[in-house]
Each structure stands twice: as structure tokens, then as C-alpha cells.
Image: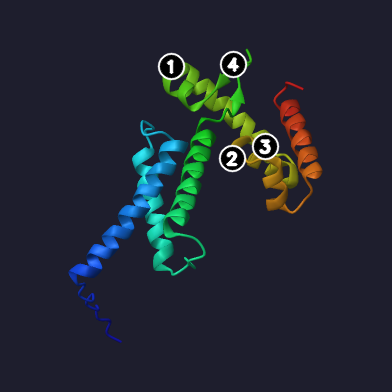
Amino acid sequence: MKMTRTQPHPVDARTLNAVNHVVESMQTAIEAVLQRVLGVTDPEYEDVLQNSLVRVITTLDREAYRGDCPLSSWAALIARKAAADALRDRYRQRRVFVHDETGESWSTFAMAAAGPEEQIQARERLKRFNKALSRLGQGSALVVYLHGVLGYELTEIAAMVGISVAAAQSRLVRGRREIAHRLGRG
């Protein structure tokens, strides 16, 4: 079976102007949200703006917009979610994974500024942490990973795993205690 490329339908100037007007109004709404949530000087502002526009256009393309609210409000909601995702990702990237023997924290930025010896020591601590995490029971390991590494809240974890918030808290406490014991800190 031979596949052929279909030619796009020609678009008249009036339709093109209408599409441009809609995109501009959505972009204005998106920019307003991102300026409030991130600020214009945020280094990821342009990326989140583009991500928001892509999400809006993709959703429109899939015909998922039902028209229950104005298009600009809907685009603003998508922008808020994109900004929250970007902030959550940034938080997770900067999250402290391990502590050294003096109690000082190692973050992504600290690793970049550390010398080669400190980086090797941090990698070794991270390997020990990963080994201790892998020896936990599956339930506790998952909760510790979701909370401590990915930054999810206990309510989110409980919903994802299908347990109560109290059970998630219990698994988190047990998991942390077990990791501290395995690392010789408990």
C-alpha cells in the first residue's frame, strides 16, 4: 500500500487573521498568568510560555476544549498548570537528596560549586542512599521516593498508591528510619 502525503487546505486571509487574533488573546492571558506566578525575569519564563501555548494548541487540535468558559480563561488555567509543573520540577531538581556527616546539605547547586573530592564523596553517599532505598520494602521505598525525591505531598502519594494518608505517613516514617539505620545514623 502506497502512502501519499495530503496537501494542506489553503487558508484565506480572513481565517488566518482570526486564528492570529485568537492566538494573540490566548498569549496575552497566558503571559498575565506567568508574570504573576513566575515573574518576567524567571530564567524559564520563555520556555514555560512556549510550553503553555503548545499545550493549548495541542488540546484545541484534539478538540478537547468544550467551550464551557471563555477561551482566554481556559488558556490561563493551562498556563497556571504549566507554571506549577515548572516550579515543581525546579523544586525537585534542587531537592536535597543526602546529608553529609557534618549535617550539611548537598543540593544541585552545591554539587556544581563543589570540588572534585566533594563531588566524589557526594556520589558515594548517594550510592549508599540508593542501596539503602533499594533494600526497603516496596511500599515504604515507593513512598520515600515519591516524597523525598520527587517532592509529592502525602495526600498526593496516598491517592497515587491507593492507601490512606495515615498509611503513607507511616510508610514514610518507617522508610526514613530504616534508611537512617542502614546509613549508620539511626
- Disc 1 from disc 3: Cα separation: 27 Å
Q: Which mark is residue 104?
A: 4
Q: Which residue is mark 1?
A: 115
Q: Residue at x 28, y 81 (%)?
A: 3
Q: What amino acid is at disc 2? A: Leu
Q: Residue at x 40, y 48 (%)?
A: 30
Residue 155 in the image, given as x and y percentages of width and height: 71, 44
Q: Helix, strand, or loop for circle 3?
A: helix
Q: What amino acid is at disc 4? A: Glu
Relative to 172, is 8 above or below? below
Residue ranking furthest to the front: 70
- Disc 4 from disc 3: Cα separation: 20 Å
Residue 181 in the image, given as x and y percentages of width and height: 76, 26
Q: Are marks 1 and 3 in contact (CB under 8 Å)?
A: no
For marks 4 and 3, give the one nearer the viewer.
4
Where, by quadrant of the figure, is residue 151 drawn? top right
For marks 2 and 1, give the one nearer the viewer.
2
- Is the residue marked by circle 2 packed among few (<14), some (14-19), or many (20+) residues within 10 Å? some
- Disc 2 from disc 3: Cα separation: 14 Å
For marks 2 and 3, give the one nearer the viewer.
2
> Which image quarter holds the N terminus?
bottom left
Q: Which residue is mark 2?
A: 150
Q: Which mark is residue 75?
A: none
Q: Which residue is mark 3?
A: 133
Q: Are marks 4 and 3 in contact (CB under 8 Å)?
A: no
